[in-house]
Image (cartoon, grey):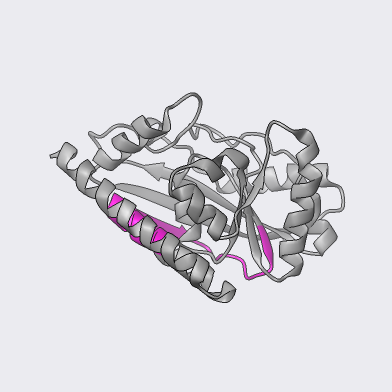
Amino acid sequence: MSELRALLRAAVVTAVTAAAYAVVPAAPPARRGRVVRLWARATLRVLGARVEVRGTGPEAPFLLVANHLGYLDVLVLASQLDCVFVARDDVAAWPLVGRLCRAAGTLFVSRERKSDAPRAAARIESVLREGRGVVLFPEGTSSEGAAVLPFKSALLAAAYRAGVPVACAALTYATPRGEAPARVSICWWGDMKFVRHFIDLLRLPRFTARLSFGAERIFDADRKVLAERLWHSVSRQFEPVTS
């Protein structure tokens, strides 16, 4: 049963993503966020996800930071917000999804070249000044969800320069009793292979994604102080992944 479920879901997710990729480049810029949001919601439904949201997401322009547990974070946040994401540059090469990310305006940054941070920060500032929303995962990597990793500050200065306070959100996941725990079946971290992990995810009958938006908006001229304050805010909302 789980193998058939995985095959059917893989086919539908591929079809939905291909349709979104066909529509996004042709859509007016103001409509692209809505298309991506519909794609994210449809994909989550196909995957068997139940999304529970607490709090209210920020209104554009915004920079929102969140903890990072894996590629599903993007779907969960995109299902609730009209935004562009900051992602590592190798995502642009992912089959189909990479093309959709490029078409949707994702801001890519190299984790290998520290010299790329000023360019990426300037691009974030530009998008914020255009009145749009940006989502950033300042941990710089994903984790198994035991705790929130320290935040890197290099890209946060863009918010201060654009005069935009930073919003926070926390993500966590849970699987049903008897299924593989979320820390290995949903969280994508360490040296996990993407294809193997995604197949195992497709086999899950269902899972829960919990997204908590904080009410606090944080503004600070010192990016390192800002990173520390944001980390504390996200950590207060965060629920460790335990099932």
Span highlighted in magenta in the image: 39-63
Residue 93 coordinates in the image, percent (x, y): 52, 42
Q: Is 58 inside the magenta-drawn segment?
A: yes
Vertical comparison of 110 with 19: above or below = above
Residue 17 coordinates in the image, percent (x, y): 38, 56
Task: Evaluate whether residue 69 shows in this view.
Answer: yes
Q: Is 181 inside the magenta-drawn segment?
A: no
Quick one: quadrant of the C terminus? Answer: top left
Give the residue at x 22% y 33%. 178
Residue 63 coordinates in the image, percent (x, y): 68, 58
Task: Evaluate whether residue 211 shows in this view.
Answer: no
The quarter holding residue 67 reads top right
Give the residue at x 81% y 41%. 224
Q: How many marks?
A: 0
Apparent side of residue 66 relative to residue 223 in the rendered image (left or right) = left
Q: Residue furthest left?
A: 1
Q: Residue furthest top?
A: 191
Give the residue at x 73% y 64%. 128
The quarter holding residue 58 reads bottom right
Residue 157 coordinates in the image, percent (x, y): 81, 51
Apparent side of residue 113 relative to residue 65 in the rendered image (left or right) = right
